[in-house]
């Protein structure tokens, strides 16, 4: 049974009819006293709770009732109903233990999806039991993720629990920890696996281009809009959109993103017809969004909209036992790439790698292994091979700093070469690359995309 609590008879009637058509049993009550009595009589599966029961519309009575309901039935998820103008109130409710919030007027499909997702998550959490790596691999598609450290396995269990739902997921972790792989695992283990998985690096999209990139535009919508453009949201429709580096998004763009995530509708620039979205949103950041919220640099309402489920990836130094397996995985990939079937990681080298700090995490380890393979003729990699100077490659006849002969290379090709060398030199740390080249992060990302230089984790 789903308990509906709202003092408006029309709202209660509409919700009851909608949920009945969706196959849910419901009970509707008008106020706090009736809600508490209903929970005491029968513990519901879920509570849909309005935030105002008086003319003041302060929400204080709704928050007070939420606290009493959570004290009475702490395991029952609560979904809040609130007007768009009182999003701050909904955020306060999320802090007080609510599972999600829906704004009035609601979209029926979005409301039903929220209820279904919340119920699925609650059921998964209640029935969860620890599973080892072998058991997880039998049940889910995790072949691209290497390691069996308990911290990593805890994340994979969470992925398995929430993948089948449409819950928004926020992936936190340092640069290079594999956030994109986790996002792909969420998609591949979901019911949307046959639909698009669209990756968007928000750090490379300026505020002025955000609407065009994300929503698309019609020809003539603005100066230089010479042709129609399909936005990233439309490309991802039916599937999953991965919003990487969400912490880099400017405040003006955060407002536009929030409205899309809330209403699941958007408008193409130059076309006022609203369009519906059916997709799963996964976001990732290497920043502490809670701190950014406290500093006023990230919207609190967007933060709570994104982090219904939060996955925190451990740094590589927190799971050093996985380093040899990861290194062997990269060596196996390079055997085929460089046609060196006898290539292998020696035990001494594996032990040496475990002792390294590797602040760049998995990305740094991968770059270190590949650079070593390129610079050594040995089939069995030793610590000495990894410790050899980076410039010791016999394949490099000329100094990287040497300029090409006049007429042998275009300025654009020279720019690409310098960027590639800088990315390799700084082991994929794009912040350092941008500073070294005197570019903003956005400008660097645009050049990486232009030249097809990979920068994903």
Image: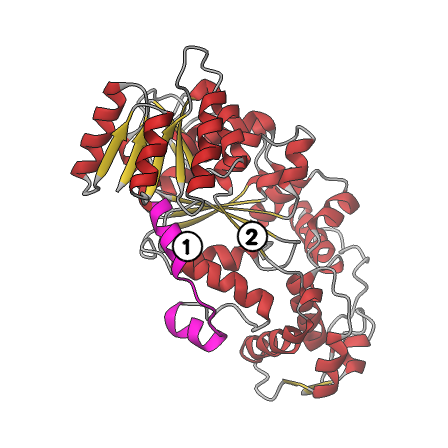
11 with respect to 145 (left or right): left
Can residue 267 be seen in this snapshot? no
| Residue 368 locus on image (x, y percent) | 71, 69
| Residue 431 locus on image (x, y percent) | 72, 47
| Residue 198 locus on image (x, y percent) | 43, 48
Crowd rating for badge 1 (residues with CA inside 10 Å; few <14, some 14–19, many 20+): many
Front residue of this view, candidates 440 and 320: 320
Residue pictured at 57% horizontal, 31% vertical? 300
- Where are the magenta residues, as a range? 117-140
**Residue 226: image tag:** none
Q: Secondary structure at mark 2?
A: loop
Crowd rating for badge 2 (residues with CA inside 10 Å; few <14, some 14–19, many 20+): few
Front residue of this view, candidates 318 and 221: 318
Front residue of this view, candidates 338 and 71: 71
113 with respect to 202 (left or right): left
Residue pictured at 25% horizontal, 19% vertical? 9
Can residue 169 be seen in this snapshot? yes
The residue that mark 1 highlights is 162
| Residue 179 locus on image (x, y percent) | 56, 55
Residue pictured at 66% horizontal, 71% vertical? 370
Q: Main secondary structure of the magenta part?
A: helix
The disc, 1 or 2, on the residue closer to the chain's N-terminal end is 1
The residue that mark 2 highlights is 452
Please identify the quadrant where the N terminus is shown: top left
């Amino acid at each position: 049974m789903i308990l509906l609590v709202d003092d408006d008879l029309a709202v209660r009637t509409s919700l009851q009819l909608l949920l009945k058509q969706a196959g849910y049993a419901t009970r509707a009550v008008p106020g706090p006293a009736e809600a508490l009595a209903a929970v005491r009589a029968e513990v519901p599966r879920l509570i849909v709770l309005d935030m105002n029961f008086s003319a003041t519309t302060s929400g204080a009575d709704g928050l007070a009732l939420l606290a009493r309901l959570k004290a009475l039935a702490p395991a029952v998820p609560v979904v809040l109903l609130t007007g768009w103008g009182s999003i701050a109130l909904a955020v306060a409710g999320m802090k007080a233990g609510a599972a999600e919030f829906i704004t009035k007027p609601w979209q029926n499909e979005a409301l039903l999806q929220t209820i279904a997702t919340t119920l699925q998550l609650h059921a998964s959490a209640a029935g969860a039991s620890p599973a080892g790596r072998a058991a997880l691999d039998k049940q889910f598609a995790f072949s691209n993720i290497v390691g069996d450290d308990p911290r990593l396995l805890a994340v994979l269990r969470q992925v398995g629990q929430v993948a089948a739902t449409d819950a928004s997921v926020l992936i936190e972790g340092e640069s290079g920890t594999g956030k994109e792989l986790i996002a792909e695992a969420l998609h591949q283990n979901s019911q949307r696996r046959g639909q698009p998985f669209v990756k968007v690096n928000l750090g490379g999209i300026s505020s002025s281009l955000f609407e065009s990139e994300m929503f698309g535009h019609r020809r003539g919508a603005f100066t230089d809009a010479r042709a129609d453009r399909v936005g990233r949201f439309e490309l991802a429709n039916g599937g999953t959109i991965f919003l990487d580096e969400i912490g880099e998004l400017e405040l003006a763009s955060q407002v536009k993103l929030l409205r899309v995530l809330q209403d699941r509708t958007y408008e193409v620039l130059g076309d006022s017809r609203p369009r519906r979205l059916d997709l799963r949103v996964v976001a990732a950041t290497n920043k502490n969004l809670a701190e950014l919220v406290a500093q006023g640099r990230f919207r609190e309402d967007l933060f709570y909209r994104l982090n219904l489920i939060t996955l925190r990836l451990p740094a590589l130094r927190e799971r050093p036992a996985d380093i040899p397996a990861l290194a062997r995985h990269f060596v196996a990939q390079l055997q085929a790439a460089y046609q060196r079937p006898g290539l292998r990681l020696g035990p001494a080298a594996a032990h040496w790698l475990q002792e390294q700090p590797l602040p760049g995490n998995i990305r740094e380890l991968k770059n270190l292994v590949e650079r070593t393979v390129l610079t050594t003729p040995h089939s069995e990699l030793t610590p000495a091979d990894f410790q050899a100077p980076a410039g010791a490659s016999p394949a490099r006849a000329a100094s990287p700093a040497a300029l090409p002969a006049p007429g042998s290379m275009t300025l654009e090709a020279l720019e690409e070469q310098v960027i590639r060398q800088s990315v390799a030199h700084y082991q994929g740390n794009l912040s350092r690359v941008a500073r070294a080249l005197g570019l903003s992060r956005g400008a660097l990302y645009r050049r990486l995309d232009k030249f097809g230089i990979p920068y994903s984790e």
